Image (cartoon, helix red, strand yellow):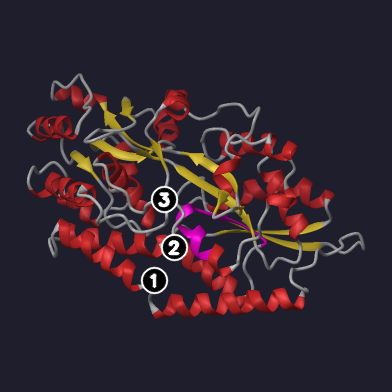
Amino acid sequence: MNMKKAFLIFVVMSLLITASVMAGGGAQQADNSSGKKVPILLWLPPFASDDGASLDKEFWTKTLAPWAQDNNVDLSIEITPWSNYEEKYLTGFSSGIGPDVGYMYNEMLNDFIDMGALEKLDNYFSAADKAKYLHFDLGFVKGAQYTVPFVVGNGRVTFFNMDLLAKAGITTLPKTWDDFIQMGLKLKNTDLGDGVLTFAQGWTDPSIGGLNTIYYPYLWQAGGEFFDSNGNIALSNNDGAVRAAQFIYDLMYVHGITSKECLSMTESDVGRLFRDGKIAVAVMAASVAKQLDSEGKVKWDFIPSLEDKKGAVWVAADALMVNAASKQKNLAVALVKNITSVPIMEAFHREIYAAPPIAVGETYLDNPRFKDMYEKSPYLKSMPVAKNAATAGDNLFKNLQRMMHQEISAQQAIQATVDYWKSIQ
């Protein structure tokens, strides 16, 4: 573990212990019946677009204002950028200004649970409360209900520009890795137009979220896993990890299907160029479909997954948590329940971020073309909760970047990640 993160974790744990002692073993709930507004801090990431923080803040401020007024709450909302997301949380908790309610992805959970930073929510939700959710059990990890699912879906799928494929005489979408290579070679050897890329990936993404499109699906398709069910690193347990890395490398350096321009592109760049008709094939978030349809520049189709040994598509299983050191836990939980209620989730999915329902009775507002994938596909996978998962993911991303810059081999990239994870236990 790097010294900066180790220090932050130490400080966080010290502060949490101090808070627990001062509160008699648990932070006391404040009484907000005195007429004074009670402060609640909410941290969320931007969903409207990569640079849409202002749109997100405007939406949540407007949408949550009635709840804040009814509960006499002074609600502060911060939209935290995806870049350095985990570090922002570590810094916030260590300085005592972390949120009462915050959004976390699976890779973050284990470390914060081990710190004692997340409140156990089991006793805050009745059986009737739990029955209102479609995926409530996804928040039960490490023996307790630590989170409430908030974004479940937004799979990373393979999009195709069908007009560009038609130029190459391609009418059938690929099913296997070999099919994909043959399709890519046909596209590569066809005049698709000035500046059009055959297949693109974002190799300079600012966060480990880039792995959701450029590596994890192929890892699982090859029969590999990042962590096993016990939270131990599993990259070296089979050849799936190396096979997936080699496949990605070969697409660029053996087959010439992936352009070297991708080494300086982000996931945002890939999405923008695909929407402008400048990329034939790209793995992107399913939410991109909303922009594709609204802009109307590209005739598109998709497949959920390619197959090598099996099929797999990454899906989010992100959730809301309550800070164990919050002085307003009851209000914090009430805020979580309000955010994840049917009316607010429908408004969120309609106005800000198209995703499958998370609440019973919620209208399906995501693109109807993905409905069967979310409801029937056997391929859906999300990241396990494991110790130092986010740190290991960041290291894996850096090692794969080194591989793509031809500094190390695929096998060396995977082994370096395994060695690093073992060194920080």
Left of 78 or right of it: where is 249?
left
Quarter that holds the N terminus: bottom left
Per the model, the C-alpha gap separating discs 2 and 1 is 8 Å
Viewer-side residue, 395 vs 22: 22
Magenta span includes 101: yes
Position in image of residue 13 (x %, y %): 58, 75
Query: In the image, which residues are magenta?
Result: 100-112
Q: Is residue 390 left or right of residue 8?
A: left
Q: Are marks 2 and 1 in contact (CB under 8 Å)?
A: yes
The three-letter amino acid code for the residue at tag 2 is: Lys
Q: Is residue 11 visible?
A: yes
**Horizontal and vertical percent position of residue 62:** 70, 46
Q: Secondary structure at mark 2?
A: loop
Q: Percent position (x, y) of residue 334?
A: 75, 50
For disc 1, the marked residue is 425
Q: With respect to residue 251, does 83 lie above or below?
A: below
Q: Earlier in the sequence, mark 2 or mark 3?
A: 3
In the figure, 337 relative to 115: above or below? above
Q: What residue lies at 68% left-to-right and 39% top-to-bottom?
A: 130
Q: Nearer the viewer, mark 2 or mark 3?
A: 3
Label placed on residue 387: 2
Is residue 401 in sight in this rendering?
Answer: no
Q: Earlier in the sequence, mark 2 or mark 1?
A: 2
